[in-house]
């Protein structure tokens, strides 16, 4: 047990005492004490008792290290999710939804309470919060309005919104990280996408790609993310995904992938770190929705999160020389596996699933075998193995190299 938990129990005990005593005069007399310097009060005595326990039991006073899940961990999770969908056609819808949740969390760092129903009767993201813009034949943009920011939902407080603009990936090796590739088919299957100008319904991907419209809306005030049936078999219409279920689904995916169990907050931590590193602390606060009530510029005169190209930053696509120089000067190589080694890990994982070799080595160049889906990139892979790579100190699974599940 950590010291932090003991102190939390102490605060809970004091809160219970205050509720039982009732009157303000009685609470003040017992908790604060009667004589200065208030050392005869219950609050001081309990705090000293906890300090003695922490010292005598040598409890750890450091907070538990938070997990930071970035592109390497996301790659593994997406591969395991793909395997699930390949095992059963009934898991495709729930698999696409889970993929969309992972990618949105990776790009935006949004809290689960902004996306799903975190508490009974709490707000959640809805279908109508999505707008799709077609900028080219295979270049799309998803605009997501978030209306349920933490700390801004209580009536009669002023509500706050965030608008997120997530573009298509522009590099071929980043195709698996394209949110459009999973969210648009999912919404089209539900029948909610329509052309904004004509109202024509889009029911299939072919309808969407062949449409001459550029703006699309999603109809309905139903939940964007739906609860799944038992075993992730299917999605239940009009029943919002619960926060506890979202954490459970992501946690089980982590376990299946051989990663420490975690929820979407691990992606939030990494998104905040990424934004602070490349854009500065103030921009990170903007991304994470911190100190909104004190920032009048963001409140009245800014597009806020819509100003940030989160796709380019997360995938390091088309970023400016300043951001590139900051990344090059940072410990990003030490803190994350390189993209080459992540792709090598994908090749390894897929080869273990197949009877025939997935790749044939020619020096350091890998050639895709016939009948198999390609790895993320056709470029040369690093000669180093995964176990030779440096590990991130704050994630315990780095202590041993990744073992793909059978």
Image: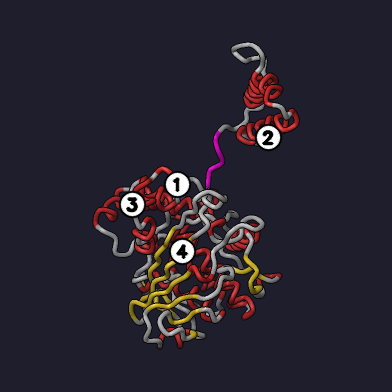
- Between disc 2 and disc 3, the foreground one is 2
Stretch of the chain drawn in magenta = 62-66
Circle 3 is placed at which residue position? 278
- Between disc 4 and disc 2, the foreground one is 4
Q: Is the C-beta separation of discs 1 and 3 under 8 Å?
A: no
Quadrant of the frame with the N terminus: top right
Circle 2 is placed at which residue position? 12
**Rounded to the nearest whole Å, what is the CA distance between mark 1 and mark 2?**
26 Å
- Between disc 4 and disc 1, the foreground one is 4
Residue 111 percent location from the top left of the image: 52, 55
Tell me which numbered mark, 4 or 3, is placed earlier along the sequence: 4
Q: Is residue 80 above or below residue 338?
A: below
Q: Residue furthest left?
A: 321
Circle 4 is placed at which residue position? 145
Residue 398 percent location from the top left of the image: 51, 51
The secondary structure making up most of the magenta span is loop
Magenta stretch holds residue 64: yes
**Rounded to the nearest whole Å, what is the CA distance between mark 4 and mark 1?**
17 Å
Structural crowding at the residue carrying mark 3, measured as other residues with C-alpha within 10 Å and reported as few (<14), some (14–19) or many (≥20): some
Structural crowding at the residue carrying mark 1, measured as other residues with C-alpha within 10 Å and reported as few (<14), some (14–19) or many (≥20): some
Determine whether, in the image, residue 294 is placed left or right of residue 113: left
Tell me which numbered mark, 1 or 2, is placed earlier along the sequence: 2
Residue 197 seen by the camera:
yes
Quadrant of the frame with the C terminus: bottom right
**Rounded to the nearest whole Å, what is the CA distance between mark 4 and mark 2?**
37 Å
Residue 116 percent location from the top left of the image: 58, 61
- Residue 210 placement: quadrant: bottom left
Q: Nearer the viewer, residue 217 or 250?
A: 217
């Amino acid at each position: 047990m950590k010291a932090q938990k003991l102190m939390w129990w102490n605060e809970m005990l004091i809160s219970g005492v205050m509720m039982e005593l009732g009157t303000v005069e009685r609470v003040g007399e017992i908790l604060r004490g009667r004589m200065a310097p208030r050392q005869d009060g219950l609050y001081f005595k309990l705090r000293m008792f906890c300090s003695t326990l922490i010292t005598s039991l040598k409890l750890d006073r450091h907070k538990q290290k938070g997990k930071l899940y970035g592109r390497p961990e996301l790659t593994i999770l997406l591969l395991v999710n793909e395997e699930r969908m390949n095992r059963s056609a009934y898991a495709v819808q729930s698999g696409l939804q889970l993929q969309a949740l992972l990618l949105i969390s990776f790009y935006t760092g949004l809290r689960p309470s902004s996306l799903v129903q975190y508490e009974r009767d709490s707000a959640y993201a809805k279908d109508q919060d999505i707008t799709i813009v077609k900028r080219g034949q295979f270049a799309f943009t998803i605009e997501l309005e978030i209306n349920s920011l933490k700390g801004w939902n209580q009536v009669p407080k002023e509500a706050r919104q965030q608008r997120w603009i997530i573009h298509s990936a522009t590099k071929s090796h980043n195709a698996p990280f394209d949110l459009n590739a999973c969210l648009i088919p999912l919404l089209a299957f539900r029948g909610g996408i329509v052309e904004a100008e004509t109202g024509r319904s889009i029911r299939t991907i072919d309808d969407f790609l062949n449409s001459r419209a550029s703006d699309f809306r999603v109809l309905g005030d139903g939940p964007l993310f739906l609860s799944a049936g038992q075993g992730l078999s299917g999605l239940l219409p009009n029943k919002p995904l619960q926060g506890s279920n979202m954490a459970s689904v992501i946690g089980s995916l982590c376990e299946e992938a051989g990663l420490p169990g975690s929820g979407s907050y691990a992606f939030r931590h990494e998104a905040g770190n990424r934004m602070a590193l490349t854009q500065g602390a103030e921009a990170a606060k903007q991304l994470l929705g911190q100190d909104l009530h004190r920032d009048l510029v963001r409140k009245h005169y800014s597009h806020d999160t819509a100003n940030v190209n989160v796709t380019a930053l997360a995938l390091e696509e088309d970023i400016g020389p300043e951001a590139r120089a900051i990344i090059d000067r940072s410990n990003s190589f030490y803190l994350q596996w390189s993209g080459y080694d992540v792709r090598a890990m994908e090749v390894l994982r897929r080869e273990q699933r197949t009877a025939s070799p997935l790749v044939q080595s020619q020096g350091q160049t890998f050639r895709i075998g016939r009948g198999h889906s390609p790895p993320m990139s056709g470029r040369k892979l690093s000669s180093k193995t995964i176990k030779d790579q440096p590990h991130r100190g704050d994630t315990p699974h780095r202590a041993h190299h990744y073992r793909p599940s059978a």
